[in-house]
Amino acid sequence: MHHTRPSLGRIIRGTPLCLAALVALAAAPQAAQAALPGSAGNTIVRNTITVNYADAKGNAQSAVSSTVDITVTTVAAAPTVLSFTPSPGSTDGTGATQAYTVRVRSNSNGPGAISFASADGSFTNLAAGTAPTVPGNIFLGATVIDPSESKKGSAQTVAAGATITFAVPNDGGVPTASATTGGATGDGVINGLVLNDVVYVSDANQVFYGPFTVSTVSDPAVGTGTSAAPASLTLTNSSGASITFTPVYGSQIVEAKDVTVTVTQGQIPLATAQNAASWVTTLSATMGGLTGTGTVTTNAHAGKISIVKYVRNATSAVAGSGAFTPPVSLNGATNTFYTSGVSAKPGDVLEYLAVLTDAGTGSSTAVYATDVTPTYSTLVSGTTYGGSTAGQIFAHARFGATETDLKRDNTGGAANVAFGLATGTSAGSTMTFYLGTGASTSAGGTLTTGQVAYLIYQVKVD
């Protein structure tokens, strides 16, 4: 026997589902506590007494009867907040928003309005709160399987895309599709359920199976005999997988609808952008004063660039302190650089290395760097890093597995590595580097979490 997942199978009520995407609702069926198993709201309970008699001469007379109808009351039950999609959600940067699709299911024996409230819970590494939206009210239909249904008590297997039909109590034409008053028999509405509604069906243990989609509604007039003629609903298995369950008299057929909750993230302190940031949002769904809740965690991400500058004497092997050997080759070589302690004589060539790392939890965008040719030195260009254009190549960049030469006139370069230009070669000349994925000749690109960009250029000591 195959049980599908909550949105593709059976659903439990009573435990708020946080971090369960609608797609990921295909888990074990879940039990729910019904409002009033056995009788649907708006069901007509009819009682008729008939008296037969004859007159004093023994002649049979027409029977006389009296009928009393009562209507079963809809009993409110706490709705179930089934899922949030995506779950958990993520935002990149600060001030971003995350929209969640939330599935809410009725647990009542009849139709009713659902209202919503939203609140924030715990925060981690956020300086300010969020402002979750609250969906507008929705109306969910519900009914039960009628005692006249022949399938009750027998296991039913409904293949994906197949249909199953159930007899359900006549609602007397009371509810419309959006309110519990008005309506009429033959209006295609059974206890608030209409064509194309998404529904779940329970078994004797109050385990819900689905989702199904209402594909046919039979809404006959109320009978005039000993029973109010039952209606019927034809349901199509829209779960994408086979569903097997055993319906019983009183099994609920309850509607579910999707609503949207939007969370706006708070400010992530720059000093802690490298740490995880998250918050918890709770959605409360209420019917008749009874509330069901669900929670979702939203993760915030922010980029944070760290940079370390190194140098080496390319003319003579002068060791310094803070030695660093890049884990990748640069311009075809693997050299050791130092953070301090390197000396040089006039005429020596110094090679500088800048290592830029996204040390945050998210992407850094529009990344560019500026540097200035040091005092008492001249920028080396033209031959050191390739010399493909005499006098132009002044630096070399590596990002990921790709390397590129950078030219003083900002031509060449590579869109997913870097572009660069230099105002000249003399001391005080400004160099600009546009770095990362999508870099251009006028704008920086993107570094994602943990990505590293390398820059090297050389100067000659005057």
Image (tube, rainbow, N blue to C red):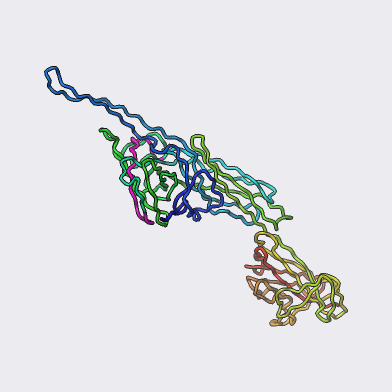
Position in image of residue 152 (x %, y %): 34, 45
Position in image of residue 147 (x %, y %): 33, 40
Corner quadrant of residue 231: top left
In the image, is residue 406 part of the stretch drawn in magenta?
no
In the image, residue 37 above or below residue 211: above
Corner quadrant of residue 182: top left
Question: Looking at the image, which is closer to me, 193 or 331?
Answer: 193
In the image, residue 230 above or below residue 434: above
In the image, residue 422 above or below residue 157: below
Corner quadrant of residue 59: top left
Q: Residue at x 58, y 54 (%)?
A: 89
Position in image of residue 66 (x %, y %): 26, 25
Left or right of residue 277: residue 104: left
Left or right of residue 174: residue 130: right
Position in image of residue 214 (x %, y %): 37, 48
Quadrant that contains the N terminus: bottom left
Question: Looking at the image, which is closer to me, 299 or 267?
Answer: 299
Q: Main secondary structure of the magenta part?
A: loop
Question: Looking at the image, which is closer to me, 97 or 109?
Answer: 109
Quadrant that contains the C terminus: bottom right
Total numbered badges shown on the rendered structure = 0
Magenta range is 158-177
Left or right of residue 128: residue 114: left
